[in-house]
Every structure is written in C-alpha cells, then in structure tokens.
C-alpha cells in the first residue's frame, strides 16, 4: 500500500477498533500465515433453483416453517457479476466514501473506495476491516450500485416499504469482505428475515435454531482476547465445541459453504455467524413479508413504538388487510422467535435519528456514550449499522 493509503487505513482502524492499538494487535494471532480457512466440513443446507420453485412453493416450504435454504439462479441477469470487482469499483467509485465501521460514539467510519480496494487486496490482519455500507442507495453517485442487482422475486413484497425512507429501519447493505473478515454470532433485529446474495468469493456460515441458548454461542470474555466478537474468532473458539459428542444434538449447526451466485435465505430468529474465505462481494437485505409480519409487528410495537404507529397508519391507507392483521395481534404473544439483546431493539444498522430512535431525542438532547467493542460491530445480515447524518443513531440491528 502506498503511504497515503496506509495513513487512511490507520486512521480508520484507530477509530473503528481503538482497542487494537498498533499493527501487532491487528495481527496478534498471525491467522494470515497459520490458519487454514478451508478445512473439510459437511455443507448441510438444502439448495433450490429459483427457475424451478415458484413463489407460492417457496413460502410454503421455507418461509412459513422458518427453514433456511440456499437459492441458485437468482442473480443470472445481474450486472454486478461483471462490475463488482476491485478494479471496476476503484475506477467507478474512486473517491466515494463507504462505511467500514463505527467509532466509540456510534458515528460511521468511512474510507474512500480507492484506499479500501488497496487495503482489501494487501492486508495481513487477523480480522480485516469490513466494508458494509447501507446508505449507498440514497447517495447521488453510489446509488448507481442499485442498477447492478435486483431483489430476488421471493423477497419483493417487503412491508417496510410502507414506512417512509426516513423512518424505516436500515435494510440494505453493499458488502466487500476481505479474506478472514466476517461477522460474529447474532440474530437479526425485530424478527426480520434476510437474504444474502454472494456475487463472488466464498463465505462460510453456521446457523443455529432460535431456541439455542445464547450463552452456548457467545465467545466469553478472556476467550478471544480483544477480538471475541469477530467471526473468525468464533470459528476458533466456539465451533470446535459444536463438533463434540457433548454438544446437544438439537442445537447442532447447519453448515454452509456459500458459493458465487448463491443467495442464502436466513429466517428471522436464526443465529448465524459468517467468515469470508476469500475476497467477497455481496448485497444483503432484511425484510418483513406477509408471512413473518405477525412476529415483526409484535417486536416493532415493543421496540420501535413510534415507527409502529407510522407504519400502521400507512397500512390503513394502502394495505388495509395488513392493518386488520395487526389489529388482531396480542403484543403479549410469544412467537418463539428470539431477538439478540446485544443488538438493541431498533433495526438494522444505520440511519440517523429516525422513527423511534427519535423517542429519546425528542425529550432531551442526544447524549453521546462510549460503546464497548461488540456494540460497535456491525453484522452480516442486515440491520446492524449506524450512519452519521448530523447525529449518531441508536444501535439498530
């Protein structure tokens, strides 16, 4: 990396993960030289072909029973297949700034694409900075990325579109993941489901049912040094435990090697963790459909009351049948779908004070607070970032 890029990388690192002081901390485990990222494991997740499974069948077989699945042939017409490379992105978005993390006060840490591309291709960090940008769709230049893909047909009826863009939870991410980067174990917020479309590269996933006790899945203090929230650390510390005879069979992970062109469906409530085995380019989105609406509505009423009121008014005007469903939902009902309490009650990852995130700020001036390392980290499947738009927002995802 040239001198200017090195300087920008160091600035981003010191803001995004100040607990790692100096390059020796970023390379403490020397994973670049010592870790085999391609050990044998059995891929146990079912594959389906988007050309062969109609929407109605997908809903009945996978969405309603909350069953994860990998979808093939959902990206055949995407321009991203040719345009999402380091060379093309560096050329087309050279001086555009993309999010690579958050600082201690919740503000976005960003890097210009030209600097990030050089870093992604040349770093030796144990768990590199991960480009995970949610606001690209609202930016005059970066919004051109929207032309490179389309939402798979199974997921187009996203009910959150009836909430205004200002209020709706962050829901869409453009992602570049260098080798060894990833996201720690988590559940997506508000009961939302997600799809993750991998354009190139390979991702390794582990998924656990919502009933799996959190304490079994989280890396505990002292087990992963200062990087215990990183996906790659999870695979070193927790994954071996899941392969022992003593691990309860009802909590056995579903293991997945996601390949280029594959789209994974992650139902709401499922724990998941991801590590990038090589350089990856992806887009991912959280959504609320008619199928998972009762769960999402119940959690939104509790966690984002102002958003729920705005959302309900929109349903009354534009989707009265959905408003009727909302009227029948008892907010005390336990749907058996967990939420990850470490990720807060709001949504996905970003956005300036909006919706319920305004609840506190309407009563008093927002007070900045120092976040622990794991609270700063964004997550792979949507709803985990924050953006800076004049003020810091609450943790979403």
Image (cartoon, helix red, strand yellow):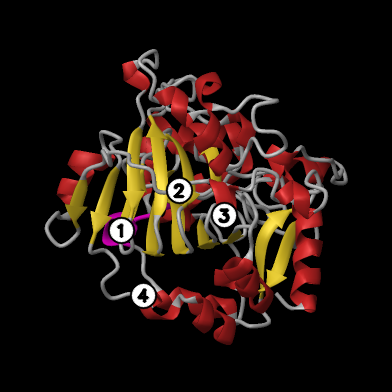
Start and end of the magenta stretch?
A: 152-159
Sequence order check: which comes first, mark 3 or mark 1? 3
Q: Residue at x 30, y 58 (%)?
A: 262
Closest to the observer, 387 or 94: 94
Q: Secondary structure at mark 3?
A: loop
Q: Is residue 157 magenta?
A: yes
Q: Report which quarter residue 39 is drawn in.
A: top left
- The residue most toward the front is 34
Is residue 389 part of the magenta span, yes or no? Answer: no
Q: Quadrant of residue 82?
A: bottom left
Report the residue marked by disc 3. Answer: 170
> Can you identify the residue that label 1 sits on?
262
Q: Which residue is mark 2?
A: 37
**Which of the two labelled residues, at mark 2 and mark 1, occupies the earlier sequence position?**
2
Query: Is 295 displayed left or right of 299 in the figure?
Result: left
The answer to whether the residues at label 2 and label 4 have Cβ atoms under 8 Å apart is no
């Amino acid at each position: 990396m040239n001198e200017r890029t090195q300087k920008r990388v160091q600035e981003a690192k010191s803001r995004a993960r100040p607990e790692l002081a100096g390059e020796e901390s970023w390379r403490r485990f020397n994973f670049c030289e010592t870790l085999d990222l391609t050990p044998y494991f059995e891929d146990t997740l079912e594959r389906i072909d988007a050309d062969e499974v109609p929407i109605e069948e997908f809903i009945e077989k996978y969405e309603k029973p909350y069953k994860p699945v990998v979808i093939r042939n959902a990206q055949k017409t995407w321009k991203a297949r040719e345009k999402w490379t380091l060379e093309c992105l560096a050329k087309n978005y050279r001086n555009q700034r993309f999010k690579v993390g958050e600082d201690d006060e919740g503000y976005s840490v960003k890097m210009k694409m030209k600097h990030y591309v050089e870093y992604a291709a040349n770093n030796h960090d144990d768990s590199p900075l991960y480009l995970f940008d949610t606001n690209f769709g609202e930016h005059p230049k970066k919004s051109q990325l929207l032309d490179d893909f389309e939402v798979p047909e199974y997921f187009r009826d996203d009910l959150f579109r009836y909430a205004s863009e200002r209020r709706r939870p962050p829901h869409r991410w453009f992602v570049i993941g260098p080798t060894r980067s990833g996201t720690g174990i988590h559940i997506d917020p508000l009961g939302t489901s997600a799809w993750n479309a991998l354009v190139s590269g390979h991702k390794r996933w582990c998924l656990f049912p919502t009933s799996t006790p959190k304490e079994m899945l989280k890396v505990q203090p002292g087990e992963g040094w200062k990087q215990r929230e990183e996906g790659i650390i999870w695979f070193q510390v927790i994954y071996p435990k899941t392969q022992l005879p003593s691990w309860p069979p009802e909590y056995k992970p579903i293991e997945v090697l996601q390949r280029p062109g594959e789209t994974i469906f992650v139902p709401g409530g499922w724990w998941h963790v991801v590590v990038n085995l090589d350089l990856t380019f992806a887009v991912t989105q959280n959504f609320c459909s008619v199928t998972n609406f009762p769960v999402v509505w119940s959690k939104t009423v509790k966690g984002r009351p102002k958003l729920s009121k705005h959302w309900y008014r929109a349903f009354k005007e534009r989707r009265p049948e959905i408003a009727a469903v909302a009227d029948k939902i008892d907010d005390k009902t336990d749907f058996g779908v967990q939420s990850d309490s470490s990720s807060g009650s709001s949504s996905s990852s970003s956005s300036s004070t909006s919706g319920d995130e305004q609840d506190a700020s309407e009563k008093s001036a927002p007070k900045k607070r120092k976040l622990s390392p794991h609270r700063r980290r964004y997550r792979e499947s949507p709803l985990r970032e924050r953006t800076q738009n004049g003020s810091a927002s609450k943790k979403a995802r």
